Image (spheres, grey):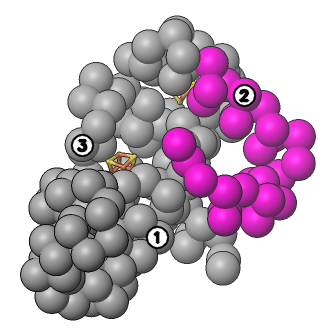
Amino acid sequence: MNFEEIKQRLAPCGLHCGKCFAFTKGDIRKNSQKLKIDLGEFDVYAERFVNILNEPVFKNYPKFKEMLSYFSEAQCSGCRNEQCKIFKDCKVRGCSETKGVDFCFECNEFPCNNTGFDEHLHARSVTINKTMLEVGVDNYYHKIKDEPRY
Ligand code: SF4
Ligand code: SF4
């Protein structure tokens, strides 16, 4: 994966859009779609399995399917292409464009208090950016690319 492709998955704040549930090209959407196909017409069987297996958990299948459908239909093209659907107060993307940097660690104001993030997310972004500065974006991405974001 080249640098431009990595940037499509790593936001300027360092968060990994690639593992976000909302990312159209993300693993959560892709795996949810596959699981949905693999489950086929499981609804009918879920009802039967409540009694056949004496497992009340199968009663929850409709709720599970609802969530699976939601994940399967994720529609975000990533931070660099549209407004983040989760962190609506994020100022980083617009700011990074104004500053002309790909990531916050490249900015002369880093670490700043202008992210619009809450304390937790701000700290996470600073940590990620410090790591990218230390090891390089490419190395950082290849280290975390398969790790869950949540
Ligand atoms: S921009 Fe926000 S909502 Fe969209 S994939 Fe990235 S983190 Fe998720
Ligand atoms: S000012 Fe802050 S939010 Fe903006 S690019 Fe620099 S470090 Fe990132």
Most common SS among magenta residues: helix
Give the residue drawn at x 77%, y 44%: 132
37 relative to 132 in the view: left or right: left
Give the residue drawn at x 38%, y 17%: 116
Q: Earlier in the sequence, mark 3 or mark 1?
A: 1
Q: Is residue 104 at all visible to an observer of this figure?
A: yes
* Residue 19 x/y as whole percent: 50, 58
Q: Earlier in the sequence, mark 1 or mark 2?
A: 1
63 relative to 87 in the view: left or right: left
Residue located beneath label 1 in the image: 27
Q: Does dot 2 land on a helix, a strand or a loop? A: helix
6 relative to 97 in the view: left or right: right
Q: Does dot 1 land on a helix, a strand or a loop? A: helix
Residue type, mark 3 in image: Lys
Residue located beneath label 2 in the image: 127
Q: Which mark is residue 77?
A: none
Q: Does dot 3 land on a helix, a strand or a loop? A: loop
Separation of residues labelled 3 and 1 (CA atoms) = 17 Å
Separation of residues labelled 1 and 2 (CA atoms) = 24 Å
Q: Which mark is residue 85?
A: 3
Q: Is residue 87 above or below residue 22?
A: above
Residue type, mark 2 in image: Thr
Circles 3 and 1 in contact, beta carbons < 8 Å: no
